Amino acid sequence: MSRESQTAARREMSPSSASPSTHSHILVIEDESSVATFVRLALERNGYQVTSSSSGVEGLQLLARQDFRGVISDFRTPGGITGADVHDWLRRHRPEMASRVIFITGDTASDETIAMLAAAGTPCVEKPFRLHQLMEAVEKTIGKP
């Protein structure tokens, strides 16, 4: 996606009158299907409702149309929009949700990723992770269902 397309997509994605959702609805943005399935099943088994997205672009479209209790996002997703971009969009358009974001990433060795994670100030669960690590972060950041 070109830089102009990304900018246009971000501009178009202003929150609409979002549809009502349940108290425990979480958006999971993850492009690795095995990780997305693991996260979705773990959350559902613990009482959360889950909507999955395989890219940051699709995730932003969902956030513009629906209410979610929180977001779990891979830090690096295809399509040119990162987890940091999603978090930035939330701060600007859905500030009540900005504190309920968790990043998951396998790229904590990169200086660029470390700097972006520090700037975002959101919790991060490093891949590979165990179920209890994920659920502890979810309950602390997003809350119990």
Image (cartoon, helix red, strand yellow):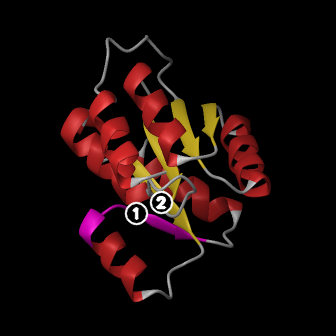
In the shown orientation, is residue 40 left or right of residue 90?
right
Q: Which residue is mark 2?
A: 103
Towards the viewer: 46 or 126? 126
Towards the viewer: 82 or 137? 82
Marks 1/2: CA–CA distance: 6 Å
Q: Quadrant of residue 63?
A: top left
Q: Which residue is mark 1?
A: 123
- State the mark number for residue 63: none
Which amino acid type is shown beneath numbered disc 1? Answer: Pro
Q: In the image, is residue 82 above or below residue 91? A: below
Q: Quadrant of residue 47?
A: top right
The reply to whether callout 1 and callout 2 are in contact (CB within 8 Å) is yes
Task: Name the element at disc 1.
Answer: loop
Nearest to N terminus: mark 1 or mark 2: 2
Query: x, y percentage for residue 134?
Result: 59, 58
Q: In the image, is residue 112 above or below residue 54? A: below
Instruction: Give the mark toward the camera: 1 or 2.
Output: 2
User: Where does the magenta region start and end?
Assistant: 119-126
Query: x, y percentage for residue 36?
Result: 70, 49
Which amino acid type is shown beneath numbered disc 2? Answer: Phe
Query: x, y percentage for residue 42?
Result: 71, 46
Residue located at (76% from left, 42% from top): 41
Residue located at (32% from left, 16% from top): 16
Q: Residues within 10 Å of mark 1 (few under 14, many from 20)?
A: some
In the shown orientation, is residue 19 left or right of residue 88?
right
Query: x, y percentage for residue 18?
Result: 37, 15
Task: Name the element at disc 2.
Answer: strand
Q: Residues within 10 Å of mark 2 (few under 14, many from 20)?
A: many
Residue located at (68% from left, 49% from top): 39
Residue located at (27% from left, 50% from top): 88
